[in-house]
Image (tube, rainbow, N blue to C red):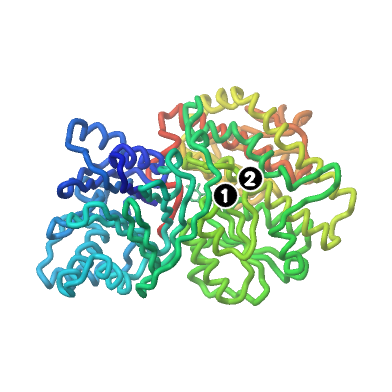
Amino acid sequence: MCGIVGYTGPKEAYPIVITGLKRLEYRGYDSTGVALLNSGLKVYKKKGRVAELEESILGKDLHAHTGIGHTRWATHGEPSDRNAHPHTSASGKLAMIHNGIIENYAQLKKELGNKGYVFTSDTDTEVLLNFIEDIKENNQCDLEEAVRVALKRVTGAYVILLLDADSPDTIIAARKGSPLVIGVGKGEHFLGSDASPMLEYTKEVVYVNDYELAIVRPNELILKNLGNEKITPFVTKLDMELAEIEKGGYDHFMLKEIFEQPSTIHDCLRGRLDATAGTITMSGIQNNIEHFKNAQRIIMVACGTSWHAALLAEYIIEELCRIPVEVEYASEFRYRNPIVNKGDIIVAISQSGETADTLVAIERAKENGAIIFGVVNVVGSSIARISDGGAYTHAGPEIGVASTKAFTGQLAVLIMMALKIAKEKGTISDERYKNLLLELDAVPEKVNAILKNADALKAIALKYKGASDALYLGRGYNFPIALEGALKLKEISYIHAEGYPAAEMKHGPIALVDENLPVVFIATKDSYHEKIVSNIQEIKARKGKVIAVITEGDEIIPGMADDVFYIPEADEIIAPMLSTIPMQLLSYYVGIAKGVDVDKPRNLAKSVTVE
Ligand code: G6P
């Protein structure tokens, strides 16, 4: 949540900062602002999207070689011009942007208020900034020292970037809990919440760790801990191209990402799955294989769509590996007093690798001796770095706020994990193992076949776009897909939708059914097929409108449903990777038909770095 960008070097800072902000808009889009350091500080900020700020400051003096920029997801204070970052200090000499939450800001605000400070915004950021300035003036120290002293008193999460009018080429940055990447160029440095703002300039980056402070100048990058000891920056090479974060001819990132799935799933399987040889190569699992084989249980922690991937993994791992699995919302797990024993395996699933709740949940579990296994998409992200082992999903950058290709990547990794552990444990027959490998191998091609038929879903979407509510029902392996389908619809069409186990719907949601309620059934051919056919009858008996996603060749359901969408036949463990594709397309087309900005739906952010 909130995107931050910085630049210092010989180039003009503004174009780099504003382009970087556009790439980071997925992190929040309530307001935008830049601070430029030339002869003095210039701050431009505004409620709304990056493009709106850009237009409003056309023709203004934007010349500078050092600058910072911010795109906001509001926490403290409504989205408005005055709550937009950067904030300036009482003296007007410091400007700061912030991603995170300062939890003890009220106490600090009170202390500063008693000293006569007046605040112009409702933000915790302005409080921290003036706290830093107050320390600088009272202790008569430099800004770097003041930041260090201030951060030792702060609780919460932050990445901050600071400009000082008296140090025209310097950016001071610090991190705890929120992500910060520094790009190292020739005589220049770039800063960002992720690497996207610097991709065309450098591939050499430093991931800043918690409790580290960076003093960044064109020719110098000094990294220190809060105890003022120098740390050698560890430079890593980025494996990402600019084209991966562009729309590539599609109207929206979401559509591009949906259509990329045949190749992203293929990339995820490539080099790991060899269906002919009957092998799965996953070093993260192999290195921990004894732990997995002997595990008394696995706990999965995640949020949002990643939580749905975890739920499906529970069904699959329990079936194939006979290891008990618990699935936890990271936000609940971190605050209750869960029983975590030494040797328990915690699987953290996260697209961004930065979700604050998931990150803290695994930090806690690690303290209790658990082994942390990360299933993460963003290479080098915080969760990936603190995990003891893991497997990347290799879906490439996902920019649309609603997760699509990262989800199918997570499913591919989790299914491979389950198969590999089951094989090593001897809990799966050779025949079933070989068959599932072949089935998994065939997924990219089958996803391709589904995508070719996307127009059929567009037609269904247009028919139901006026609905105010929708129900998504599935059983067994398709139940998590029902939850995911409902979440997708909510996120990008603002239609209230609920996912339910198809049989459980009799205990409540059935009261909502009338001739206006669309009910989406995920009813592929599996061991629950006859049961779900009965559930469809129950909805039809109450005049609900049934949209059913079914397996090619199904001759029963088309006779009772209002609309059907066919997907290729697949083993029931693999089928969710296919049945989720029509869920994504249906919500996309409903969202578009309703005029929603599907890549940036209201109130949401892609990377939730506040709890
Ligand atoms: C946000 C995003 C979701 C995502 C969830 C968890 O809510 O909008 O798409 O599923 O965060 O994020 P993570 O990066 O941990 O998978």
Name the quadrant of the C terminus.
bottom left
What is the tally of numbered marks visible in this picture? 2
Circle 1 SS class: loop
Q: Position of residue 430 (x, y in %)?
A: 89, 52
Relative to residue 263, is residue 526 drawn left or right?
right
What amino acid type is highlighted by mark number 2? Gly
- Which is nearer the eye, 494 or 38? 38
Element type at mark 2:
helix
Mark 2 nearby-residue class (10 Å; few <14, some 14–19, many ≥20): many
Which residue is the site of mark 1? Answer: 377
What amino acid is found at the position of numbered circle 1 in the picture? Asn
Q: Residue 233's image quarter?
A: bottom left
- Residue 508 can be seen in this image: no
Residue under the image location 63 percent in, 55 percent down = 310
At x 58% / y 53%, what residue is drawn? Answer: 376
Residue 472 placement, left or right of 203: right
Q: Position of residue 218 (x, y in %)?
A: 32, 51
Q: Nearer the viewer, mark 1 or mark 2?
A: 1
The image shows residue 481, relative to residue 316, as above or below, that is above
What x and y, as percent, mark residue 267? 66, 41
The mark nearer the N terminus, 1 or 2, is 1
Does the residue tagged 1 have its C-beta within 8 Å of any atom of ligand 1? yes
Q: Nearer the viewer, residue 591 or 519?
A: 591
Whether residues under marks 1 and 2 lie with C-beta atoms below 8 angstroms apart, the answer is yes
Spatial separation of the CA atoms under disc 1 and disc 2: 8 Å
Horizontal side of residue 13 vs 182, given as left or right: left
Tell me: residue 106, above or below residue 462.
Answer: below
Identify residue for label 2.
Answer: 409
Q: Is residue 261 above or below residue 136?
A: above
Residue 175 picture quarter? bottom left
Report if residue 95 is visible in the image.
Answer: yes
Residue in view at x 18 percent, y 73 percent = 111
